């Protein structure tokens, strides 16, 4: 998929990294690099405006309100993603978790650096082209869960510099 793009995957847990390495080897994919660790530490080292896409697929939901600060979808990470995307680049976020979806809508809606690309429900109810199905997503679907696919285009607005990173 997209052989002319370079991909960086991030995962802190060894088992996930080993599984991904197996797929990369079996499919002979030459354009993927993996970082075993925090995705934010990779993002911080990437030049501003360098990325065409950022995918946040089925992040841990941290459903309890008192754990909301641990969610990846929060002001600091979202500002960082905004800085690293080029204007017109896309932030793609997928979840099957209704609490996380509501939270994400609150974080993203009205955000000056992003435009939500959905014009009608099918735009966020069907997986868009070029968006890979993950293992977690396939399992969620087998369990009968709805999955939501949120696409946000990076506007030309300069993002805030966040102090909480
Ligand atoms: C619910 S799983 C989804 C895994 C995969 N994205 C999928 O859709 O099949 C959430 C994953 O996010 C990883 N994770 C949690 N915090 C992370 C971080 N700061 N950077 C990168 N990955 C993280 C976890 O280790 C876990 O594998």
Image (spheres, rainbow, N blue to C red):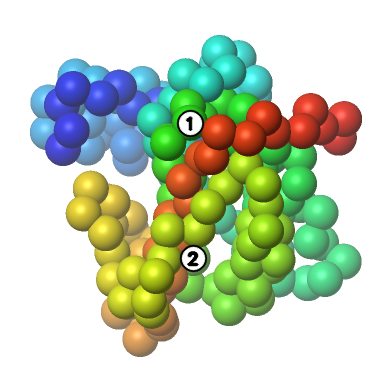
The residue located at (31%, 76%) in the rendering is 122
* Residue at the limit of the structure toward the front, as seen here: 156
- Choose top left, top right, bottom left or bottom right for residue 108: bottom right
| Residue 41 at x, y percent in the picture | 64, 24
Disc 1 target residue: 87
Quick one: 6 or 123, which is closer to the camera? 123
Q: Residues within 10 Å of mark 1 (few under 14, many from 20)?
A: many
Q: Which of 131 and 133 is in front in this view?
A: 131
Instruction: Left or right? Give the position of 131 relative to 156.
Output: left
Q: How many marks?
A: 2
Of labels 1 and 2, earlier in sequence is 1
Residue depicted at 39% across the width and 70% down the height: 119
Q: Where is residue 5 in the image (x, y as percent from the top left)?
A: 25, 25
Q: Residue at x 22, y 30 (%)?
A: 24
Using the numbered discs, state the Cα–Cα distance from disc 1 to disc 2 in whole angstroms.
24 Å
Which mark, by number, is residue 95?
A: 2
The answer to whether mark 1 is within 8 Å of ligand 1 is no
Disc 2, ligand 1: is the CB inside 8 Å?
A: no
Answer left or right for 4 relative to 15. Answer: left
Q: Measuring from the top left, give residue 157's x and y in whole percent.
A: 63, 35
Residue lying farthest to the left in this orientation: 27
The label nearer to you, 1 versus 2, is: 1
Residue 165 shows in this picture:
no
Query: Residue 76 appears in which quarter of the rendering?
Result: top right
What crowding class fits label 2: few (fewer than 14 Cα within 10 Å), some (14-19), or many (20 or more)?
A: many
Location of residue 79 (image quadrant):
top right
């Amino acid at each position: 998929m997209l052989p002319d793009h370079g991909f960086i995957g991030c995962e802190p847990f060894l088992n996930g990294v080993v599984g991904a390495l197996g797929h990369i080897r079996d499919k002979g994919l030459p354009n993927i690099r993996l970082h075993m660790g925090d995705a934010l530490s990779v993002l911080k080292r990437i030049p501003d405006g360098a990325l065409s896409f950022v995918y946040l697929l089925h992040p841990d939901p941290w459903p309890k309100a008192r754990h909301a600060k641990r969610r990846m979808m929060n002001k600091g990470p979202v500002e960082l993603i905004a800085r690293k995307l080029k204007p017109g680049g896309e932030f793609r976020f997928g979840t099957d978790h209704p609490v996380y979806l509501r939270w994400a809508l609150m974080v993203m809606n009205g955000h000056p650096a992003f435009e939500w690309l959905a014009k009608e429900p099918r735009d966020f109810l069907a997986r868009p082209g070029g968006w890979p199905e993950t293992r977690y997503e396939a399992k969620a679907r087998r369990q009968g869960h709805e999955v939501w696919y949120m696409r946000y285009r990076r506007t030309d607005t300069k993002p805030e510099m966040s102090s909480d990173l």
